[in-house]
Amino acid sequence: MHAYVIGVDLGGTQVRAALSDATGQIYRRVATATKADEGQDAVIERIKSLIDQVWPKPDQGTVKAIGLAAPGPLDPTSGVIVFAPNLPGWDMVPLRNIIAGAYGLPTFLGNDANLAALAENRYGAGRDIADMIYITVSTGVGGGIITHGGMLLGSHGFAAEVGHMTVEAQGARCLCGNSGCLEAYASGPSIARHAVEALHQGATSMVTDMVAGDLSRITAKELHDAAKAGDRLAQAEFRRAGFYLGVGITSLLHLFNPRMIVLGGSVMKVGALLTDAIWEVIRARAPHQYWEGLSIVSAALGDDVVLIGAIALAEAESQRRGQTMARVP
Ligand SMILES: [Zn+2]
């Protein structure tokens, strides 16, 4: 009989659930719209409904644990979502205990970007790498730090917020309230905002025609297309974002001395334009001992990375518990 785990990825637009085993292979998966505006209780009912849908039939096996991924800030120790910008009204929600109580199973909660790091470490690009940092660059900039083979959580589980490292002390305002955060320079919306400012100041780019003159429609996607077509401004904007990513990564190299950096998220699809700029900064700024054995690679798990992270959390935590119990005489 199989002992499965169930992973749930609670996102601002979609909730997804999957049934998996220790290898990370997905046997059954379902998804539905989050509809966060309908309120917390409705969303929690949708989570339970998805769990029920992937649950194995009695002759197929049992479920040993449930892993939940949610947007932070959240406390993985108490299993409480502190608040969630994408889930209006979610304030100190004990999601882990709600789900554990409903199913009577060991249940674990983790921050989505941290769990994406765990997924890449267990089943993706960073397999068997004990010291690895995952960075996702899309609407925001998030990440997770694997050190000595374990996930770095910090005292309240708020660690590894790589997007809120200061990279420019008097710099641009960030949504978190601070100034000069990496996210304010490298996220998709930040890159687009800077390009629009340049256009307002008289710079020219084919991207203006791509949005029929409506600069408010410019996103990192249009800039990516323009950069591929050789547009100077678009290319410069991505090089600028790459520069700040390189500055942030240089600090991470000094702090954690990783062997691998895994880069994911929609903005990283731009590829060499960003990674060349990142490498240029690292080589210029960090002592060679930090980067000679360093690999910077693309994430391997695609859009499922957070869902697989929830599965990896359930699997890792239930294994750890099993070992602890086995040691009890
Ligand atoms: Zn910030």
Image (cartoon, rainbow, N blue to C red):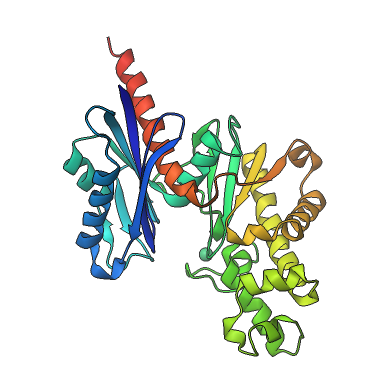
251 vs 281, nearest the viewer: 281
Q: Is residue 305 visible?
A: yes
Residue under the image location 26 percent in, 59 percent down: 43
The vertical placement of 294 against 81, above or below, is above
The vertical placement of 66 against 213, above or below, is above
328 vs 135, nearest the viewer: 135
80 vs 55, nearest the viewer: 55
Residue found farthest to the top: 329
Residue under the image location 60 percent in, 37 percent down: 126
Q: Tell me the quadrant of the picture where the N terminus can be found.
A: top left
**Image position, residue 256 (x, y; %):** 62, 40
Q: Residue 61's quadrant in the figure?
A: top left
**Image position, residue 303 (x, y; %):** 51, 52
Residue under the image location 80 percent in, 75 percent down: 232
**Image position, residue 301 (x, y; %):** 55, 45
Question: Is 219 left, or right, of 226 in this rendering?
Answer: left
Question: Is 185 left, or right, of 282 in this rendering?
Answer: left
Residue under the image location 76 percent in, 51 percent down: 282
Q: Residue 172's quadrant in the figure?
A: bottom right
**Image position, residue 16 (x, y; %):** 37, 52
The vertical placement of 259 against 2, above or below, is below
